[in-house]
Amino acid sequence: MPTVSVKRDLLFQALGKTYTDEEFDELCFEFGLELDEITTEREQISREQGDCKASGASEVVLYKIDVPANRYDLLCLEGLARGLQVFKDKMEAPRYRRVSPASGEPQRLLVTPETAAVRPHAVAAVLRDITFTQERYDSFIELQEKLHQNVCRKRTLVAIGTHDLDTVCGPFTYTAKLPADIHFRPLNQTQEFTAVELMSLYKTDSHLRHYLHIIEDKPAYPVIYDSNGVVLSMPPIINGDHSKISLKTKNVFVECTATDLTKAKIVLDMMVTMFSEYCAEPFTVEGAEVVSPDGSTYMYPELAYRTETLSSEFINRKVGINESTERIAGLLTKMCLRSQPTGAGDQIQVEIPPTRSDVIHACDIMEDAAMAYGFNNIPRTTPGTYTVANQYPLNKLTELLRQDLAAAGFTEALNFALCSQEDITDKLRKKLCETRAAHIANPKTAEFQVARTTLLPGLLKTIAANRKMPLPLKLFEISDVVLKDETKDVGARNSRRLCAVFYHRSPGFEVIHGLLDRAMQLLEVAPARGTGYHIQAADDSTFFPGRCAEVFVCGVSVGRLGVLHPDVIQRFELTMPCSALEMDLEPFL
């Protein structure tokens, strides 16, 4: 959950009321939030960086509030105060409007075909005649950063640019150029750089270096120009210094470039609705025209309202209350969802504003009704059905075996469920087609390319990492492997396995064989052909020729044991003989 840090006194001023810490904590709970911490800037810096760094820091009280991850409208003081005021019936939810500019001609953003290979989408809007104070300006910048970290997925999906419209001249052009052909003075710099030089400059920047990977491998970089060739921004990295906003800025041009158009529309709506209250005409946003590469023209922001109809019976049944249709409509209105009975039975028409992109289904509306009613006010009821819980049989068997195998002198290991392709093929002297492995589509590292099909590589790597420990090394693991299975709806299945290894100066086959006998004793399987278990010689490229056996239970093969092949031992960087046992546990249920 994102945490929003707001100054207590500013928040209370916006709410028009002063609360004690306990009262505000209760208010947050009622609204579905959590007051996580009460601190000061000085205390925060002192805790994170030490007392010497905290000298001179502010003593203003800060409230740190945990906000649901999908409530983008609560990520700044403006949205938070607005939501709480509507909740407390101190104001009506505002109606946001897109208006035409007084000049008649909207600002235009032309998108060229070159952007398709980098960030193909763009949206824009204008906040006209806005008034900034230091607190409003700080909140404006902080909201951009919160959105970048949240819905924008660290600028990979959307990047926000805000510019002083009075310093640039439209129409604007969003294009992509070779890095060497892009020249401009970036934000807070005193000289011009090419895009190539900027990427080198920001590799050591603690903030911006995290975003360089988004475009650094692209042949062309996205860039936005005004009609005079002035660079507004190079998204998603940095804005130009020429058009930076300040406390004196009166007209703000907001642009969002994106790989996901839906997210871009949501982000633009959030930016302009939150701060349109500071415009000369509150809650109005000047539209901007975006011309796509195919010549199609779109007006943004959309600020789209939509309506949903649902019954009060649905909400009463799901929440566990018994309220009238009018009462439920009033509850939803408190959550910024203007609602009214339709007059047709118990149907309620709910209007969803552009700030509530989190409302997707009827259950989201029901959740808001429950929140407005008060979770503590919902009557306690006894469930209509009774169930008795018990442990999942396979897990119960696993836990019992773990304890007894440890009592037998073996140490349990726990390894990753993913491994490299080489671990289950070349190192075990197997071919890839024999493994039935599920492959990771876009692995981030060579160590995690496939889901493991055997537990043996993990144990052998554990031994390799602990070779300095006293011998013998006796390890076991009981965990799942993943095997391809076309009969399953997902194309693969989990299989619970037991694997054990014995590593010493001598192979110790008899130790592993003894562990097998002990495991079968615990599983109450007698040593007998046909009705119990038995082993018989087998050939397996992972094991030494003539030193491998297959384990059968009631005539069905459940695993193998033997002395590992010297090539396998060498490929896992081991130097001594090793015996291993691996078998499937699911047939014993």
Image (cartoon, rainbow, N blue to C red):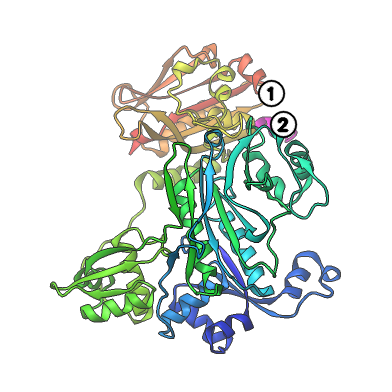
Residue assigned mark 2: 467
State the residue in front, 527 or 9: 9
Q: Mark 2 touching mark 1, by CB under 8 A?
A: yes
* Residue 456, percent from left and from top: 54, 28
Q: Is residue 68 visible?
A: no
> Around disc 2, counting alpha carbons within 10 Å, would you say few (fewer than 14), some (14 to 19), or many (20 or more)?
some
The relative height of residue 524 versus residue 71 in the rendered view (above or below) is above
Report the magenta stretch's main SS: loop
**Residue named by callout 1:** 574
**Residue, far left:** 345
The C terminus - image quarter: top left
Q: Is residue 380 magenta?
A: no
- Spatial distance from mark 2 to mark 1, Cα to Cα? 8 Å
Q: Secondary structure at mark 1?
A: loop
Farthest-out residue, top: 545
Amino acid type at image mark 1: Leu
Label of residue 50 in the image: none
- Residue 85 lies left or right of residue 414; in this view the side is left
Question: Which residue is more in the foreground, 347 or 167?
Answer: 167
Taking the spot 62% from the left edge, 81% from the top edge, the residue there is: 10
Q: Residue at x 46, y 75 (%)?
A: 83
Type of residue at label 2?
Arg
Q: Position of residue 265 (x, y in %)?
A: 46, 54
Magenta stretch bounds: 463-470
Q: With 103 as the anchor, is 303 left or right in this view? A: left
Residue 183 vertical position relative to residue 9 in the rendered view, above or below: above
Left or right of 456? Residue 213 is right
Q: Residues within 10 Å of mark 1 (few under 14, many from 20)?
A: some
Residue at 40% over, 48% down: 396
Q: Is residue 28 above or below residue 395?
A: below
- Report x, y in % for residue 231: 68, 46
Tell me which corner region of the image, top left, top right, bottom left or bottom right, holds residue 471.
top right
